[in-house]
Image (cartoon, helix red, strand yellow):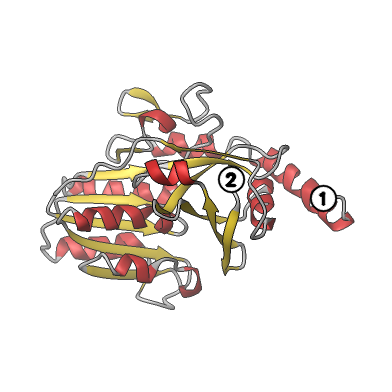
Amino acid sequence: MCEIIDKKILHENLKQIVVKAPLIAKHANPGQFVIVMADEKGERIPITIADYDREEGTITLIFLEIGTSTKKLGSLEVGDKLYSLCGPLGNPSKIEKFGTVVCVGGGVGVASLYPIVRALKREGNRVISILGARTKSLLIMEKEISNYSDELMIATDDGSKGKKGFVTDVLRELIESGERIDHVIAVGPIPMMKAVSELTKKYRIKTTVSLNPIMVCGMGMCGACRVRVGKEIKFACVDGPEFDGHKVDFDNLMKRNQRFVEEEGISLVRYLDTQWKGEV
């Protein structure tokens, strides 16, 4: 099992793979993730499940090739098998009838948002989705999310589609328009989730964020994914990955995620060098 049965290049280093994983597909729910190893020397990396098909026994993963491990994963083709795939992990998203829910997604985080949007709509919520990217070509799952949204709004940094600016600009305008918002869910880059949470806190709108700290085991044993939430230390893998955005210490999270930047850079240079020499 764990065979890649479909692969798409969404944009340059942005890849989508569909993996045969019947047991994971059977138990997967919105908001959960898997731990992936591309090969026996690869590190364990968490990737949120972008979609799952219980009948076909497949899960969809979308990821950006940034470091050695994601580049190894991106080099695999249809017919190749993952060395290891563990999941579903983490607590599922809390899905209930909130009323009007604004779902904010940025970058690759949009993929994680899709199952949540779908589940919220099926539960009877009014769903407003706000998607953001640096430029139009980097927007993903726009059609899929639109199918389950009452309204879809777009923001791009360069103005190539939708509003020029950030998702927070769109969210601010929505709030100030008088739209009643019962809940906000944000998934994406840490600075984006921080900005969304700071904005909604001013208006006392309950906000949930999905955190993406450095993670190793994914089962609460190693402690690598610890985050500060209020006055407590939580493990994102078993206590999350979703938390109250108004209580998360985003500054601490950003510092922790930068801890191994130098080592990651060295690893990538070595990997690319061996690729160039034809050793891998």
Q: Amino acid at mark 2?
A: Met
Task: Give how far across and how far down residue 28 sits, in percent.
Answer: 38, 44
Q: SS class of the residue under badge 1?
A: loop
Q: SS class of the residue under badge 2?
A: loop
Question: Is residue 227 at least partly visible in the picture?
Answer: no
Marks 1 and 2 close (CB-CB < 8 Å): no
Residue designated by label 2: 1
Task: Give how far across and how far down residue 156 sits, in percent.
Answer: 41, 70
Residue designated by label 1: 280
Q: Amino acid at mark 1?
A: Val
Task: Give how far across and how far down residue 274 sits, in percent.
Answer: 84, 50
Please, is residue 68 above or below residue 157 in the view?
A: above
Question: Is residue 8 at least partly visible in the picture?
Answer: yes
- Pick the front one: 278 or 152: 278
Observer-side mark, 1 or 2, equals 2
Compared across the picture, whether 97 is left or right of 81 comes to left
